[in-house]
Amino acid sequence: MQALLRVSGAIDWINDKLGILANYLVLICCAVSAGNAMIRYAFGYSSNGWLEVQWYMFAAIVMFGASYTLKRNEHVRVEIFYLYLSERGQLWLDLFGALVFLIPVCVLLAALSWPFFMQSLAVNEYSSNAGGLLRWPIKFVLPAGFILLALQGVSEVIKRIAALHGDVVIDAHYERPTQ
């Protein structure tokens, strides 16, 4: 079990670093958006490339932030069941959800999005907009994000099994969003 917990720790470390990157991308995206708007209104100049950079950063924020959010136990849950279960019941529900839904769906979506990326890479696809950007790098974010989310699901499964065996204590506490 200790070897699996080290694998889990490595996955958590990778997704933590990518989550930090996603957090910085939010700030950079805001700065690019504000700068683009100021230049457009002050100087009457605009570039499709800058607009596409914003879209690319947003896609990276979502796809890399998903695994980070799962790692931090802040993802959406089916509260109607979860909040009424004991801590052990919550661990079992997390385990079931990850094995039956999360990991298989992420693997399927990564597999389905891989040809989409490969086709774009093969033709060196560019945006059809004037001044547009290369498309295959952002199309790679799709399968990469789903793979990272599936890996984080594996990490969570390892941690839940270890907690159920009493090898570790994890904080699986979930608070209902206030919004």
Image (spheres, grey):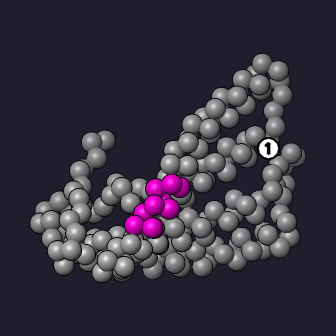
- As drawn, is 175 to the left or to the right of 137? left
Crowd tier of the residue under label 1, counting other residues whose Cα lies within 10 Å: few below 14, some 14–19, many 20 or above: some
Magenta region's main secondary structure?
Answer: helix
* Amino acid at circle 1: Gly
- The one nearer the camera, 46 or 21, is 21
Residue 3 located within the stretch drawn in magenta: no
Q: In the orientation shown, which residue stands out farthest toward the top?
A: 42
- The one nearer the camera, 153 or 101, is 153
Q: At 36% across and 55% down in the image, what residue appears?
A: 72
Q: At 70% across and 77% down in the image, what residue appears?
A: 115
Quarter of the image for the C terminus: give it. top left
Quarter of the image for the N terminus: give it. bottom left
Can you tell which quarter of the image residue 35 is in?
Answer: top right
How many marks are shown on the rendered structure? Answer: 1
- The one nearer the camera, 161 or 47, is 161
According to the image, label 1 marks what residue? Answer: 49
* Residue 1 appears in the rendering: yes
Q: Is residue 49 above or below residue 35?
A: below
Residue 11 at x, y percent in the picture:
45, 67
Q: Secondary structure at mark 1?
A: helix
Q: Is residue 147 above or below residue 58?
A: below
* Residue 85 appears in the rendering: no
Residue 87 at x, y percent in the picture:
15, 65
Residue 10 located within the stretch drawn in magenta: yes
Residue 52 at x, y percent in the picture:
73, 46
Can you tell which quarter of the image residue 141 is in?
Answer: bottom right
Residue 39 at x, y percent in the picture:
77, 25
Q: At 86% across and 70% down in the image, what residue appears?
A: 123
Q: Is residue 100 above or below residue 129?
A: below
Q: Which residues are magenta?
A: 9-18
- As drawn, is 126 to the left or to the right of 5? right
